[in-house]
Image (cartoon, rainbow, N blue to C red):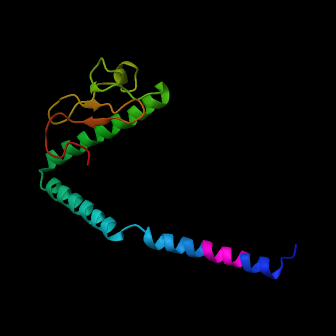
Amino acid sequence: MKLSKKQSIIAVSVLFAVVAGILVTGFFFRPSWSSLEEAARARERAEDEYMEGFSKLPATEREATAACQENQRRILSVSISYYAGEGEYPPGGSINKDHPLVKKGYLQSVPTCPSTGKEYVLAARGKESPPTIRCPSNVPYHDSP
């Protein structure tokens, strides 16, 4: 199909207008890189402060803290497995022998904080959102970063 000269000019003009529109939109609605960079720097500072404080703990406390955080990650992983098997996330509350994660065999035993022996608390955020796991010991650095 051959276009007439008039049709060719119209087609090129439309193409030019579309490209110009895309360029103008990209110029005026681009993300603010400075705010993104500032947020990244703030996160790095927070992580550095966390690690600096963590590294000052005695070795036995660092080991207990690492074990506590690992327990919390394991509980979150088991909660995701529970969701896959049951179709909803487990209910909130203290993870004890009566909690569905233990009763249904997702956890073989009741996990406790290695420093204090307290049971972890699962904070449900609805049936479609993964829960938050908290260490009720109030020991610094025991909540997962």
> Which residue appears at 30% of the width and 17% of the height?
98
Q: Picture quarter containing residue 48?
A: bottom left
Q: Quadrant of the N terminus?
A: bottom right
Whole-percent x, y for residue 74 in the image: 34, 37
Of residue 69 and residue 138, the one placed in the foreground of this image is 138
Spot occupied by residue 113 in the image (x, y as percentages of width and height): 20, 34
Residue 46 placement: quadrant: bottom left
Q: What segment is highlighted magenta in the picture? A: 11-18
| Residue 122 x/y as whole percent | 28, 31
Please give the name of the residue rendered at 81% of the width and 82% of the height, measured from the top-left corner: 5
Asked if 72 appears above or below 48 in the picture, the reply is above
Q: Is residue 60 above or below residue 45?
A: above
Q: Is residue 2 left or right of residue 70?
A: right
Predominant SS along the magenta part: helix
Farthest residue, direction front: 6
Is 21 situated left or right of 48 in this image?
right
Say if the magenta span includes residue 16: yes
- In reply to whether residue 79 is colored magenta, the answer given is no
Q: Position of residue 75 (x, y in %)?
A: 33, 34
Q: Is residue 49 above or below residue 136?
A: below
Q: Residue at x 19, y 55 (%)?
A: 50
